[in-house]
Image (cartoon, rainbow, N blue to C red):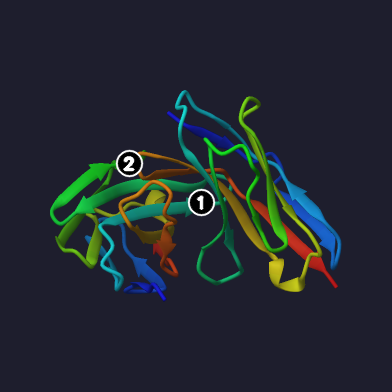
Amino acid sequence: DVKVTQSSRYLVKRTGEKVFLECVQDMDHENMFWYRQDPGLGLRLIYFSYDVKMKEKGDIPEGYSVSREKKERFSLILESASTNQTSMYLCASSLPTERDEQYFGPGTRLTVT
Amino acid sequence: AQTVTQSQPEMSVQEAETVTLSCTYDTSESNYYLFWYKQPPSRQMILVIRQEAYKQQNATENRFSVNFQKAAKSFSLKISDSQLGDTAMYFCAFSVDYKLSFGAGTTVTVRA
């Protein structure tokens, strides 16, 4: 079974802090994704990576950056956390074909106070 | 840009009955994939069913089936013989260039 894990289920940070969210997948997937999930808005893509050190902006990249130094690990970075970044963050991975499903991690609920 | 609309925020269904979730999308692409994902309470999102736009035949996975109307850009999900374990939020999603665009979700509650 594909396993996608995220470093924390719950996280509380203060405004202005630098925040790292880590995601690891164990199925050698080329593609990895970061989404944020908000009520009434569904999931919105923040960043996408299709290979090591490669990244592409999604629909809402402002205030975020990413790092992919190894194939299995994809990190989301909030350089200076703000209260409007309080959300559920979901990581996903997939094979590099259009028809293949994305496998999701359990999510990290981030609260910025 | 692709948009996905789920017009039903919440639905409730009696166990063993059928419920249909609606989804419409907007795109200028001719070839794409559509998915329904399920997110149970406090559990990970999983794929329910997928449909390839170039296939006219509607996809079916056990009790889950879709009604895909390409011209109308409609992709509804039917859950037959609903079970308590079907209680979840359901997301319709559209894939182009490996990236998914999601609808806002429909919360389905199955009543015993």
Q: Position of residue A77 (x, y in %)?
A: 23, 57
Q: Which amino acid does the dot numbered 2 rest on?
A: Gly
Residue beneath disc 2: A58
- Horizontally, residue A24 falls left or right of residue B112, namely left
Answer few, some or many: residues within 10 Å of disc 1's Cα (few below 14, many 20 plus, some between 14 and 19): some
In which quarter of the view is residue A91 placed? bottom left
Q: Secondary structure at mark 1?
A: strand
Query: Which is more toward the observer, A26 or A39?
Result: A26
Q: Are marks 2 and 1 in contact (CB under 8 Å)?
A: no
Q: Chain of mark 1?
A: A
**Residue A17 visible in the current orientation:** no
Name the residue: 40% across, 63% down. A110
Expressed as whole percent of the image width and height from the top left, the position of residue B6 reads: 64, 41
Instruction: Say few, some or many: other residues with alpha carbon within 10 Å of mark 2 (under 14 / 14 to 19 / 20 or more).
Output: some
Q: Earlier in the sequence, mark 2 or mark 1?
A: 1
Gap in angstroms between the C-alphas marked 2 and 1 = 16 Å
**Secondary structure of residue under mark 2:** loop
Q: Nearer the viewer, residue B54 or B75?
A: B54
Q: Mark number for residue A38?
A: 1
Residue B26 % position (x, y)? 54, 28
Left/right placement of residue B51 relative to residue B96 reads right
Visible residue check, residue B23: yes
Q: Is the C terminus of chain B in the top left, top right, bottom left or bottom right quadrant?
A: bottom right
- Above or below, B94 against B50 in this view is above
The residue that appears at 44% across and 56% down in the rendered structure is A101
Q: Mark 2 belongs to which subunit? A: A
Report the amino acid beneath label 1: Asp
- Which residue shows up at 43% across the image and 66% down it? A107
Quadrant of image for the N terminus of chain B: top left
